[in-house]
Amino acid sequence: MTSEKRGPGFYVLTAFFILFVLFLYGPLSTIFILSFQGPNGGLTFPMNGVSLRWFENLLFEQQAVGDFGGAFSRSLLLGLMTMLTTVVVSLLAGLAFRRRFLGSGPLFYLTIASLIVPSILISLGIGLAFNVFGLEPAWYSSGFGAHLTWTLPFGLLIMFAVFNRFNPAYEEAARDLGASPWQTFAHVVLPIILPSLIGVGLFGFTLSYDEFARTLMTSGSFNTLPLEIYGMTTNVTTPVLYALGTVTTLFSLAVILIALATIAVLRKRRARRLAG
């Protein structure tokens, strides 16, 4: 049995993939390692011992520079607000666009246009608009709106793809059995699209949680976590900055794992119901 000989393109793509992995995970690995510096360690290699000193400093001691707890709570709350709004609006828009209506085409392109506009310009425009109308920019108002201009297009595109592949025969069968429109949605449509809705929520939360450019001019007097970390890079001279990066990265990974586990459980339940 002869094996197929690999062409030069295979090795080029392999080298490209290796470089991609190094650029993606190399900086994260460096920050993760340096966050375990000894008590007398600095911001660079070589490491001066190994300890949990900087995690203790981050979590249990008052910081001279930066408001980690406040920034994290604001980012978490803003991410949850954005996630819920993105899921609800994307679902309703997906249902609405299942049928053609007057102006649906221009409305669709206007909705996703924010994806191609530079984020810093959107942030600047929203901040200026609030100032023109005499309103004070804040993370829960102007910042919230700025984040929705980033998350909603992704949510809409996902839901459009989901409903484009949705088989309407399931709804027709439910109506033939006497189900009302609400019962058809709650007991037929929603269980089928629920994993996709979780994906939309995950997109909404993660995109909002680490968004920097669209928050820069719209957060007002209080920073979110990305802005706080950026400000710390010019003031903090200890590995506590790396400890913060490690903690926030692990939190983001935990959110993704929880979402994936939830989707897996829902799929197993759906498979059992179909088998039963």
Image (spheres, rainbow, N blue to C red):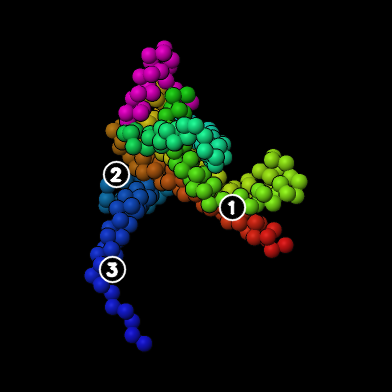
Gap between marks 3 and 2, in whole Å? 39 Å
- Quadrant of the frame with the N terminus: bottom left
Work out whether mark 1 precedes mark 2 in sequence or the reverse, and give the earlier one.
2
Q: Secondary structure at mark 3?
A: helix
Q: Are marks 1 and 2 in contact (CB under 8 Å)?
A: no
Q: What's the distance in space between the residues labelled 3 and 1, CA to CA? A: 39 Å
* Quadrant housing residue 265: bottom right
Sequence-wise first label, 3 or 1: 3
Q: For residue 16, which quarter of the picture? A: bottom left
Q: Residue at x 47, y 24 (%)?
A: 141
Callout 2, which amino acid? Leu
In the picture, measured across the screen, residue 183 lies left or right of residue 265, that is right
Amino acid residing under circle 3: Phe
Q: Is residue 127 above or below residue 195?
A: above
**Residue on which the image places disc 1:** 167
Q: Nearer the viewer, mark 1 or mark 2?
A: 1
On residue 10, the disc is 3
Compared with 187, 126 (above or below) is: above
> Is there any visible trace of residue 251 in the rendered image?
no
Q: What's the magenta region? A: 120-140
Which of the image's four quarters has the C terminus?
bottom right
Mark 2 nearby-residue class (10 Å; few <14, some 14–19, many ≥20): some
Asked if the magenta segment contains residue 246, the reply would be no
In the image shown, does 61 or 275 lie closer to the viewer? 275
Q: Main secondary structure of the magenta part?
A: helix
Q: Which residue is mark 2?
A: 43
